[in-house]
Amino acid sequence: MRFGPFLNIESPINRIIVVQVIVTVSAAVMCLIFGLAAAYSTLLGGLVCVVPGFIAARMVITKGVRLEKSETGLGPVIRSELTKLVLSVVLFIATFTLVKTLDVLFFFGAFIGLQLVYVAVPVMEANLLRRRMAGNKSG
Amino acid sequence: MEQSLIYIAGGILMGLGAVGSGIGIGMLGGKYLEGIARQPELQPMLMTQLFIALALVDAVPIIGVGIALYLIFAV
């Protein structure tokens, strides 16, 4: 499935990012129960995780698709990881200095929860594939 | 005195996280290069898997960096 030129959901990286965006928005909406500060803290925690991940993924995918002889090594991955780290640090500093009424528990809860998506999505996909293969064998 | 202890704590948080992720990323990168040396045609698939694994390895140090920056800038 393709959503425009920027989002090819067939790529596993993009699938993880789409799940992260969905989890962020739904968690922020659910956290409205605890108040507005909790909701926007959750949203900010999610964005600090998703935005650097998305930009790093774009760098890897565009470099990975257009394979050149000089780009077959670790270069694109290391550049994207460096960008991700720097962006994360900048967003953390911006959040902590600009947002005065931040609910830290919700902020870090959302951030850590979204990091777990990196584990959850591949594991769920592997389980789904295993079940499908088991179903094909029995059927 | 308290503020300087917070800076030291933040530094230790970031530093120890960086040691762990450095070892992990080094091992991952080495295995990735071995993989593309053996089967160069699998390079795009291996790069995607490498990127996901790198994000996993990076998760804990980045959480450490976040908490350290919170200690330094907000506490």
Image: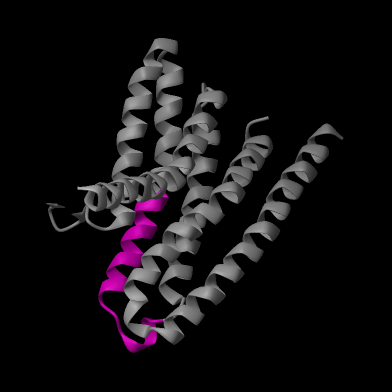
Residue located 66% across and 65% down the image: B23
Q: Taking A130 as reference, is B28 above or below it?
A: below
Q: Where residue A19 sits in the image (x, y, percent)? A: 32, 41
Q: Residue furthest right?
A: B1
Q: Is residue A5 left or right of residue A21?
A: left
Quadrant the N terminus of chain B occupies: top right
> Considering depth in this image, is B56 or B63 the residue closer to the camera?
B56
Residue A63 inside the magenta-drawn segment: yes
Q: Where residue A12 sits in the image (x, y, percent)? A: 31, 55
Residue A93 inside the magenta-drawn segment: no
Magenta: main secondary structure equals helix
Residue located 63% across and 31% down the image: B74
Q: Where residue A102 sits in the image (x, y, percent)? A: 52, 24
Quadrant the C terminus of chain B occupies: top right
Q: What is the number of callouts on the image?
A: 0
Region of the chain picked out in magenta, as a range: A52-72
> Considering depth in this image, is B49 or A27 the residue closer to the camera?
B49
> Considering depth in this image, is B21 or A45 the residue closer to the camera?
B21
Q: Taking A62 as reference, is B53 above or below it?
A: above
Q: Residue furthest front?
A: A138
Residue located 60% across and 70% down the image: B26
Q: Is residue B34 left or right of residue A8?
A: right
